[in-house]
Image (cartoon, rainbow, N blue to C red):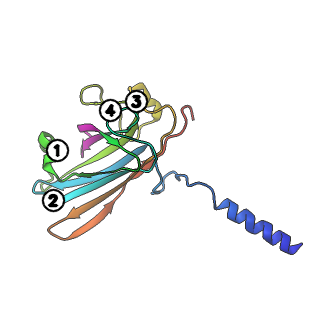
Amino acid sequence: MKKLLFTLSVIAIVAAFSVNAFAIIGADDNVPAQRIFVPFFGFSDDNTIATLITITNVANTGGSHEPGSLKVHYTVYDNKSVHVYDDMIYFSRYDVEGIDCGDINWWGPFASSFNLDPVYGLRYGYVIFDIVTNDVNFFQVLDPVGVAADLNDDLIAGYPFPTYPMNWLIGDALLISVTEGYAAELACHEIEATNLGD
């Protein structure tokens, strides 16, 4: 009898720890999500300090810049939450997209929109990545809703979220100093979607 109880308890423990991974609210977990929030990036005008952000599509879904591709909209804000820039990224299956926030050519005319910190000589901001169902450019269409807003607020504002959860993105960010030879990992928050109405 003792052997049977021991065997059943081992099976119960193994079964309890073999479930799928889910995000824990408030934890810095690295699970796929529909929204990625990078609360800080910084760069210098001479590109000696930069932030590298990578976004990964972990799903077997995506394609080219055509119907069926995984569409990700990103919105960039300065350190005073002023909308600076937004654009679309198109992912293929298991694709990784890298963004060098220190590349002034990448920012183009928007680089000067970030306030320059006179003490550190850096420009700061934050960025939000969202899976969307169709191309959108808030610079021309809408004023985006704030950071990690409630799904219903985003839908009311016209944000084209999918009608079912598509938790397929993982984000990473590094702050790199070329002159001092260091890199520091920055926080990327994966915000999972649930079914509408949950």
In the shown orientation, is residue 193 left or right of residue 143? Answer: right
The residue indicated by pointer 3 is 160
Q: CA distance from mark 2 to mark 1?
A: 20 Å
Tell me which segment is drawn in magenta: 75-88
Q: Please report whichever mark, 4 or 1, sits nearer to the chain's N-terminal start.
A: 1
Separation (CA) of disc 4 from disc 3? 12 Å
Which of discs 4 and 1 lies nearer the camera? The answer is 1
- The mark found on residue 107 in the picture is 1
Above or below residue 38? Residue 151 is above
Q: Which residue type does callout 4 highlight? A: Pro
User: What residue is rendered at 34% in x and 33% in y?
Assistant: 66
Q: In the rendered structure, which disc, 1 or 3, sits on the residue that comes first in sequence?
A: 1
* Contact check, label 2 and label 1, Cβ < 8 Å: no
Dot 1 surroundings within 10 Å: few (below 14), some, or many (20 or more)?
Answer: some
What residue is shown with label 4? 144
Element at badge 4?
loop
